[in-house]
Amino acid sequence: MGAWRWIYVATAVAAFWFNFFVLIVQSFEKVKLLNPAAPMVGPPFAEPVNTHFVIAQAVGLVFFVLVGIVAAWKFRPLPPTV
């Protein structure tokens, strides 16, 4: 029963990160201030033209990895009931 708590925390944080990933992508596409920094579409495996998008995604990923570690560490099993 204790292992499911860690799995729950990991999947909840992963789902939240995927939503945040889409938020960053949509922000770079829709917000006029960020649109010039959006990556350019090119041939497969093209060199990145602008790294602002990659930096934003990397910062988000590092943040959610740290939040996931802290959440998994703090999410203790319930004390046994008598």
Image (cartoon, rainbow, N blue to C red):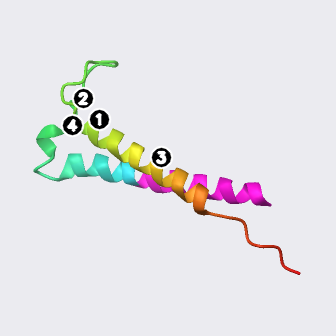
Residue holding disc 4: 52
Q: Gap between marks 2 and 3, in whole Å? A: 28 Å
Residue pictured at 22% horizontal, 31% vertical:
51
- Which circle marks residue 65 in the picture? 3
Answer with left or right where residue 4 lies relative to residue 82: left
Q: Label 2, on which residue?
A: 41
- Residue 76's place in the image compared with 50, above or below, is below
Q: Is residue 63 left or right of residue 30?
A: right
The tag earlier along the polypeptide, 3 or 4, is 4
Of residues 14 and 38, the one drawn nearer to the viewer in this rendering: 14
Q: Secondary structure at mark 1?
A: helix
Magenta region: 1-19
Q: Quadrant of residue 75?
A: bottom right
User: What secondary structure is the magenta-colored segment mainly?
Assistant: helix
| Mark found first going from the N terminus, 4 or 2 | 2
Which residue: 54% across, 51% down? Answer: 69
Judged by depth in the image, the label closer to the viewer, 3 or 4, is 3
Where disc 4 sits, the SS reads helix
Q: Residue furthest right?
A: 82
> Image check: 35 left or right of 66?
left
Q: Position of residue 2 (x, y in %)?
A: 76, 59
Q: What residue type is disc 4 on?
A: His
Q: Earlier in the sequence, mark 3 or mark 1?
A: 1
Determine which residue is flagged by label 1: 54
Disc nearest the viewer among 3 and 1: 3
The residue mark sitting in front, 4 or 2, is: 4
| Mark 4–mark 1 CB contact (< 8 Å) | yes
Closest to the observer: 61 or 36?
61
